Image (cartoon, rainbow, N blue to C red):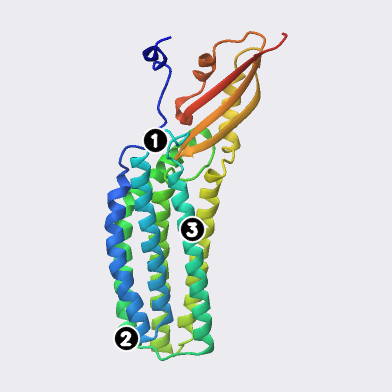
Amino acid sequence: MHTKTIERWAHDHAFGQDKKKSGERRTMIVIGITAVMMTVEIAAGMAFGSMALLADGLHMASHASTLTISAFAYYFTRRHARDARFNFGTGKINSLAAFASATLLAGFALVMVWESIMRLLSPVRIEFGQAILVAVLGLAVNGSCLLILKDDAHEHAHDADDHHEHHGHDHGPADHNLWSAYLHVLADALTSVLAILALLAGRYMGLAWMDPLMGVLGAALVTRWSWQLLRASSRVLLDMQAPEPVKKTIRERIESVDGCRVSDLHVWSVGPAIYAAEIGVVTAAPKEPGHYRKLLPSSLRLVHVTVEVARCEP
C-alpha cells in the first residue's frame, strides 16, 4: 500500500496546541508589571521594617517566577506541538507548569511563615506611613493585573462550566496554566489587603503584632492555592482516569448498540480539556472500530480514540 494511501488514516497529535493561546500575551504583560512591583515591595518592606509588606513582596516574587514558568510553558507547547517524540502532543506541559508553580508557592509560604514567627519573637520598628503607601500601590498593581487576565481566565473557566452542564462532570478549568496565573494574582491581591489591614491596625490601634500575624495568614492563603493547583495538575500528570460521568457517557453510547458491551475503558487527559481513550468492545456482531468511534459525541473532546473489538457468542 502506498504511503499516500496510509496518510488518509494518519493524523498528527498537535490537537490545536500549536496555536498561540489568547492568554499568552497578557501573561507577558503581567510578568513585567509584577516584577517591578515585587522589587519595590521587598525593598520597602526591608527599609520600613514591615513583615506584612515584605511577605506581600515575597508572595509577588513567587508570582513573578510562576508567571515566567507559565509564559515558557505556552512557548514550549507551541514550539514542540508537532514533535513526534511526544506521544500525545505537548498538552501536558500546561499542567506541568501549573504543578511547578504550585511547588514554588509552597516554598515561598514556608519562608513567609518562618520570617513572620521570627518577627513575632523579635519585633522590629515599622514605618507604618510609608509601608501603607507601598501596600496600597501593590494592591492597585494587582488589581490591574487581574483585569488584564480576567477575560481570558473567565473564558476558559466558563468553557469548562458549559462542558460540565452538558455532561454533568467536573474536571476544572480548561487551561491549568492560565487559571494558575489568574489565581496567583488573585491571591496576591488578597495578601495585599491583609498587609494594608495589618499596617492600619499597627499605626492607629498600636497593634504592631498584627503585622507578622498577617504574614502567617498570607502564607496560609498561599498554601491553599498551592494545594488546589497541585491536586488539579497532578491528576493530569499521573494519567488518572477522567471523571466517572465522562466514562459513563462513553459506556452508554457504545452499549446503546444491541449486544455490545464495554469490556475495558481508559480515559485520560492529554491537554487542556482534551482526552484520549482506549475502549474494549465485546459483541456478537462486530463492526469496524470507526463505527464505534462515531457513536461518541464530539462535545466530549476525545481527540485520540483507540477501539479494540472482540467477537463473542450471542
Where disc 3 sits, the SS reads: helix
Residue type, numbered disc 2: Gly
Res. 193 in view? no
Pointer 2: what residue? 129
Circle 1 crowding by C-alpha within 10 Å: few under 14, some 14–19, many from 20: some
Residue 226 placed where, x, y %? 50, 60
Classify mark 2: residues with Cα within 10 Å, few (<14), some (14-19) or many (20+).
few
Residue in the picture at 34% in, 85% down: 47
Q: Nearer the viewer, mark 3 or mark 1?
A: 1
Which mark is nearer the camera, 2 or 1? Answer: 1
Seen at 50% across and 66% down, the residue is: 107
Within 10 Å of disc 3 (Cα), the crowding (few <14, some 14-19, many 20+) is: many
Specify the amino acid type for callout 3: Ala
Left or right relative to 98: residue 246 = right
75 and 129: which one is in front?
A: 75
Would you say the residues marked 3 and 1 are in contact, meaning their CB atoms lie under 8 Å apart? no
In primary-sequence order, the first of circles 2 and 1 is: 1
The quarter of the picture where the N terminus appears is: top left
Q: Position of residue 250 (x, y in %)?
A: 57, 26
Instruction: Name the foreground residue: 203 vs 300.
Output: 300
Q: Measured from the top left, where is residue 280 in percent x and y?
A: 62, 22
Quadrant in the rendering for residue 48? bottom left
Task: Pinpoint residue 296: horizontal percent, then vertical percent.
Answer: 51, 23
Q: Which residue position holds label 3?
A: 102
Measure the C-alpha gap from mark 3 to mark 1.
27 Å
Mark 2–mark 1 distance (CA, rounded to whole Å):
55 Å
Q: Which residue, given by chain and number where applicable, does mark 1 sit on?
A: 83
**Secondary element type, mark 1:** loop
Query: Where is 239 relative to 115, above or below?
Result: above
Question: Who is closer to the viewer here, 239 or 213?
Answer: 239
